[in-house]
Amino acid sequence: MATMAEMVKAVKEHAESHWAEDGWDEIAESYEDREIAEVLEREEVTSVAEAIHEFHEIAKLRKERGDEIRATAW
């Protein structure tokens, strides 16, 4: 079982190192530590792997929504 600080740090590091993939830039730019912790707590995440998986789902969703919005600009 990972601590909240470990999980938040892992999510932030993963977002930075995967910036151009699957919307991770959205996580890196949009979420503060407190917000990451709130999501992890709400979803009852207890491991680093689960934390990254949870935010990968969020990142993909945010990217899809952004892509849809940009597609309507034309």
Image (cartoon, rainbow, N blue to C red):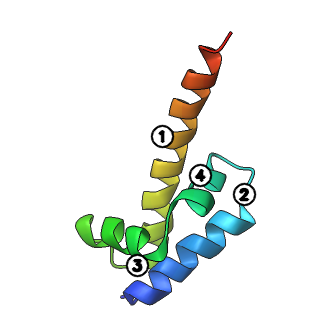
Q: Report which residue position mark 4 lands on.
A: 26
Task: Give the Cα separation between the discs numbered 3 and 1.
Answer: 21 Å
- Using the image, determine if residue 62 lies above or below residue 51: above
Q: Amino acid type of disc 3? A: Ser
Check the picture and name the quadrant holding the N terminus: bottom left
Taking the view exactly as shown, the residue that stands out farthest to the top is: 74
Nearer the N terminus, badge 2 or badge 1?
2
Q: Amino acid type of disc 2? A: Trp
Task: Give the Cα separation between the discs numbered 4 and 2.
Answer: 8 Å
Q: Residue at x 66, y 54 (%)?
A: 25
Q: Report which residue position mark 3 lands on.
A: 47
Q: Amino acid type of disc 1? A: Leu
Nearer the N terminus, badge 3 or badge 1?
3
Given this view, does label 1 or label 4 mark the residue nearer the observer? 4
Q: Amino acid type of disc 4? A: Glu
- Using the image, determine if residue 60 lies above or below residue 48: above
Nearer the N terminus, badge 2 or badge 3?
2
Left or right of 59 on screen, residue 45: left
Would you identify the image quadrant in which residue 34 lies? bottom left
Location of residue 23 in the rendering, given as x and y in whole percent from the top left corner? 62, 47
Judge the density around disc 3: few (<14), some (14-19), many (≥20) Cα neighbours within 10 Å. some
- Using the image, determine if residue 58 lies above or below residue 18: above
Q: Residue at x 52, y 54 (%)?
A: 56
Taking the view exactly as shown, the residue that stands out farthest to the front is: 73
State how many labels appear.
4
| Image marks 2 and 1: residues in contact by CB distance under 8 Å | no
Q: Residue at x 39, y 68 (%)?
A: 35
